[in-house]
Image: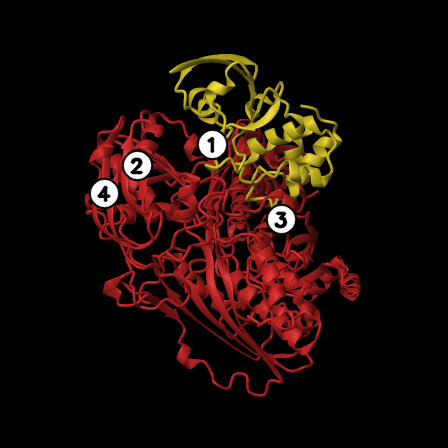
Amino acid sequence: MTRIELTVNGEKQSDEVEPRLLLVHYLREVLGLRAANVGCDTTSCGACTVLLDGESVKSCTVLAVQAAGHEVTTAEGLARDGELHPVQAAFRQNHGLQCGFCTPGMVMATVGLLSENPHPTEAQVRQGLEGNLCRCTGYHNIIRAVLAAADAEVTA
Amino acid sequence: MSILGTRVLRTEDPKFLTTGGVYTEDVVDDRLAGAYHVFFVRSPVAHARINSVDVSAALRAPGVVAAFTGADLADLAPIPPAAAGLMKAEMQQRLLATDKVRYVGEAVAAVVTEEAYQGEDAIELVTVDYDQLPAVLGYAPTDDSLLFEEAGTNVAGYWGDASTLKADLFDGCDAVVSHTIINQRVAPAPMEMRAAAAVWGEDGRLTTWIPNQGAQGTKAQLAGLLGVEASQVRVITPDVGGAFGAKFGADPEHAIVAWIARHLGKPARWTETRYENLIAMTHGRAQQHTVTMGGSRDGTIEAYRLEIVQDAGAYPKIGAILPMLTILMTPGPYDIPRAEAVAKVVVTNTTPIGAYRGAGRPEATAAIERAIDLFATEIGVDPADVRRRNLLAPFTEPHRTAFGALYDTGDYAAALDKALEAADYPALRKEQAERRASGDARQLGIGVASYVEITGMGDGEGTPPEENATVEVHPDGTATILTGTSPHGQGHATAWAMLASEELGIPVDKITLRWGDTDLIPEGGGTGGSRSLQQGGAAVQQAAQELLEVAKVRAAAQLEANAADLVFDKTRSAFNVAGDPDASVPLTALAENERLLIRTVFSQPGATFPFGTHVAVVEVDTETGKVTLQRVITVDDAGVVLNPLLAEGQRHGGIGQGAAQAFLEEVVYDADGNPLTASFADYPIVSATEMPSFELADMATPTTYNPLGAKGIGEAGSIGSTPAVQNAVVDAVSHLGVRHIDMPVSSRRVWQAIQAAQPGSERS
């Protein structure tokens, strides 16, 4: 077991973990933050996307010990004072989610994308979210939501 | 102003966007404290005799509590084939394979551990001794190697009798085209994989959380698999991360998890990996069609024949029933004087086939829409014109087809014309002609597909399709709805609240929807076959209206007035005495002394038949075969729309999945039956980069079968878009001599088709 210390959604955490424990399982099973989901075994689907020091990563492909000393933000940490983050609000406004399983990862990937490129074209949004799969929406309203959030001049 | 027909934002969303949905794997419940984890050992070979299964090494691994093989489950009866009486009764499935394995992914043993990671390690230690047998694959399996020796054949059964096909069906036709085409096997691949959590109470009852499409049906099937009374089972449906037809009922794994929980006297849970999901959740489609179409050179279709082979996979499940639906919808929206269809169902050493968005109807549409394009090309008439010439005339009284379907209402030509206009079809054809004339390497293809489909068909056994709803108004100003439908992305919580709000004057955000707990809601048909709004929604509306009648009697007593003199003011959610605005009582006050609730059942005269036309525009690079989907323009007429935001979302999702089948997705096996698409790195599930934004044109032809005027919208998108995209790709290269390319119309297949069509090449 290895002790890790890290910041998750602004709160300091310190835990003994197995070295092979994946960050997504640390978040879900140890901290009880279950918004990030596991949707594949091959780093393909992005349902587990979180921010590591502000950059989007797939938390199924990061070991918890690799996150030690870093800041992790999950979908649970995005809203402020009960108000949806502008990206979350744009997803709701544009019906950018249906079953919701890909949604926390999609939202975090979007926050990461817009922090790198605040005003992407539709093609850039599609390219930027290529690693986040959604089976419900045909991506149409997700793209609308991201472009709307960008128009609202969102920064991470 | 009515809330119906408006774009109400989903009340479900804030949770999904912040803390996330609570899917089965997320369920935290005291009853599940200390639950064991179940992992399945799955066959790595397609067809083999099992000599032995040795779990002894696994049992010595850290954290392993128990391990079970098929022999341990001897008390559980095998699963009989679907369509009893039509499919070979010997084609039964043991919950864990015993004597034979019949597909890669079939469960052979289950290992139970204290922690999840321990199970992943331990299943590697189970040793199974297999004697491999030749794998049976494809649509024309011989009987040299038999999946079920006792059945004596790999043909599971038939729908219709091929000997009755008429030898003279195409007599008198100026032109006849025929082709054998594959409607390939695809993976439903909902983002949430299958899972279960199970615990038996001291009262001997099972409580189990399962992602499903209808808890009541899942409960009945699960009880059957476990051999217990249905009253012994409580199914709870957590949030469900997509289903697409593949989460109906209960699978063997769900029963095994419950069996293990009972056997060990501890709660148990299971979540499959994506690898397992792609090889062990049912697949969809997998039909071979031989289409033959004949008619006159003016474009009139006189005769059509559809011969189907359904690959049911290793066990005849829902896949064995799909051809019935395909045959039912054989002629689509067309008026064809002579049409016939038959089907043969075969078993192969592949994952069993189940329902996938549309389930049997997309196959019918794909077959005839491809046939029409082949016919149009043969006679040199524009494919849109051929469609218009043969579509049924508009009708408002039900139309009975030769295949027994009763189309409720339809105006198919209007949908075609609207879609062509929205696409600016003449301009597209002009651009195509210009590119062809200039020899552009990037050619434009335009595909058209018209469809009609069947939704909300009920159990198909003569009882009318129906659904129940309960509406209760509470003294605190809120209301609760119980529904027998089972949302997994469709937005019922918002839509059903809109229907109740419209009647009761209670705001949408004060209305809570509950579903999917069989103790709370013992009856229900679930969500599938695009049935929910037309039956479940109509039931909510009916319940709310009936509740107002009960409330009115109470209001009359309270106001000491005659009930006939009372009017309900929706804007204030209160009863007033007509002409005396001061004499008023709020609806919620009528729930203070006695519960104010109504349960009702809405019954629909029959299934409804939404319809539409899709137009797809593709660019094909003739040098590389690369296909780029540029536009999809659709008219999907599902009657009156309750919430355009939700209806559009259903259309988008369907269009995306249908288009993905046309040019991307396919489950592939090698010659030995090894799956080559068992991960998302290998299965080309559609991503955002491969899709364009969609262009939706609206049309609403009401049905008279329910007071909402609504038909189903869940599957329509996936029915029209598949053949539209496929037709577009073939159209892009038809001037080079290409007549057909099987799906998925991948770069490789397009390039090969172009090469094969070159002068001097042998046509394939």
- Three-letter amino acid code at disc 1? Val
Chain label for disc 2? B
Could you confirm whether marks 4 and 1 are on the same chain? yes
**Considering the numbered disc 3 on the image, is that residue within a helix, a strand or a loop?**
helix
Q: Nearer the viewer, mark 4 or mark 2?
A: 2
Depicted B605 relative to depicted B341: above or below: above
Residue B547: % across, % down: 52, 42
* Residue that mark 1 sits on: B22
The disc, 3 or 2, on the residue closer to the chain's N-terminal end is: 2
- Three-letter amino acid code at disc 3? His
Residue B652 is tagged as: 3
* Left/right of residue B588 with respect to residue B569 in the rendered view: left
Q: Confirm or deny contact between disc 4 and disc 1 (CB under 8 A).
A: no
The disc, 4 or 3, on the residue closer to the chain's N-terminal end is: 4
Q: Nearer the viewer, mark 4 or mark 3?
A: 4
Q: In this view of the protein, which residue sits in the foreground, B493 or B252?
A: B252
Query: How is colour applied across the structure in the image?
Result: by chain
* Residue that mark 4 sits on: B69
Q: Which chain is yellow?
A: A
Name the residue at 55% across, 57% down.
B744
Name the residue at 65% across, 36% down.
A128
Q: Confirm or deny contact between disc 3 and disc 1 (CB under 8 A).
A: no
Residue A151: % across, % down: 75, 32
Q: Which chain is red?
A: B
- Three-letter amino acid code at disc 2? Ile
Q: Is residue B200 visible from the viewing direction of this image?
A: no
Give the CA distance from mark 4 to mark 1.
32 Å
Give the CA distance from mark 3 to mark 2.
40 Å
Chain label for disc 3? B
Give the CA distance from mark 4 to mark 3.
44 Å
The disc, 4 or 2, on the residue closer to the chain's N-terminal end is: 4
Name the residue at 61% across, 52% down.
B655
